[in-house]
Image (cartoon, rainbow, N blue to C red):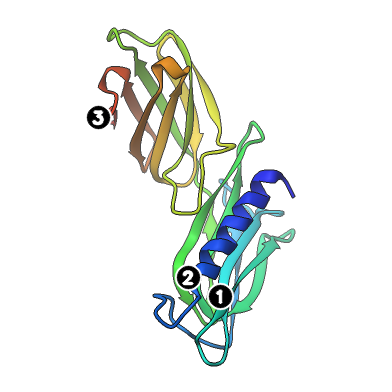
Amino acid sequence: MPLRSQLTALLLMALFTTGASSQRSPNPCVHGTAHVKGIIRDYNGMPAPGARLHLAAIEWRSDCRNGRGVLLEARTDSMGVYEITAPASKATLTIENRYRNGDHDRFALLQDSVLTGEVRVDYQFTRLHVEGNVLGKDGRPWRVGRLMYFLRPTSWTCCSGSPEVPVRDGRFEIDVSPPGEYVFWSFPLEEMLTTAIPIHSDTTVTIDLREMGQDAGRSK
């Protein structure tokens, strides 16, 4: 397993194990099993074989005083079908998205949802095209640099390994998935800026390096 996958798995396990330590936990104590299944489709609506899913759950003791974190993994078959059987509990189901350049990221299909019995979760990847303009500190198009971009993280995600795109003459183009609020980091460090921009359709965005620490990004 790649280092980033190992680190993500450890963070997921730590999060759910900590949350299950006592009756005062906000996690509801439920027993039994949850059978999660569905079909994952690619951008064109065709079955997506080999997609990787992770389900982080809690297995409670009978007295509901303690529980242990459980992290399960599944891959879709040739028809895009997956199945995961897990302890019934509040759980998070994530899917891995691989980009054209070989980078990858994870995002949640279900976040802190109570799963019991039969649960159906289908998903189709979407690809949103983003054309971007970047203004430098002088207000002119940023001549050359790089942008790292990733879906706004939850408590267990990190930007490490996220895709990057070069900026030339103040312009860049990317495809993102899924819709949501995306964080952009600009490099080199002397120009470093972090901003978040909501992206829910094909769009054009503008990032202004003069507005460091403010709302530096906007979309049309």
Q: Residues within 10 Å of mark 1 (few under 14, many from 20)?
A: many
Q: Amino acid at mark 3?
A: Gln
Looking at the rendered image, the disc whose residue lies closer to the viewer, 2 or 1, is 2
Measured as percent of width and height from the top left, residue 165 is found at 52, 24
Mark 3 vs mark 2: in front: 2
The residue to which callout 1 is attached is 58
| Secondary element type, mark 1 | strand
- The circle on residue 214 is 3
Mark 2 Cα within 10 Å, few/some/many (few <14, many 20+)?
A: some
Q: Earlier in the sequence, mark 2 or mark 1?
A: 2
Residue 153, above or below 35: above
The x, y position of residue 20, in whole percent, is: 50, 75
Q: Dots 3 and 1: beta carbons under 8 Å?
A: no
Disc 2 element? helix
Labels 3 and 1: the sequence-earlier one: 1
Q: Which quarter of the figure is the C terminus placed in? A: top left
What residue sits right under mark 2 in the picture? 19
Whole-number angstrom distance, CA of label 3 to CA of label 2? 34 Å
174 in relation to 169, above or below? below
Q: Position of residue 121 (x, y in %)?
A: 53, 67
Q: Residue at x 27, y 10 (%)?
A: 139
Of the numbered discs 3 and 2, the one sitting upstream in the chain is 2
| Residue drawn at 28 percent across, 27 percent down | 216
Name the residue type under label 2: Gly
Label 3 secondary element: loop
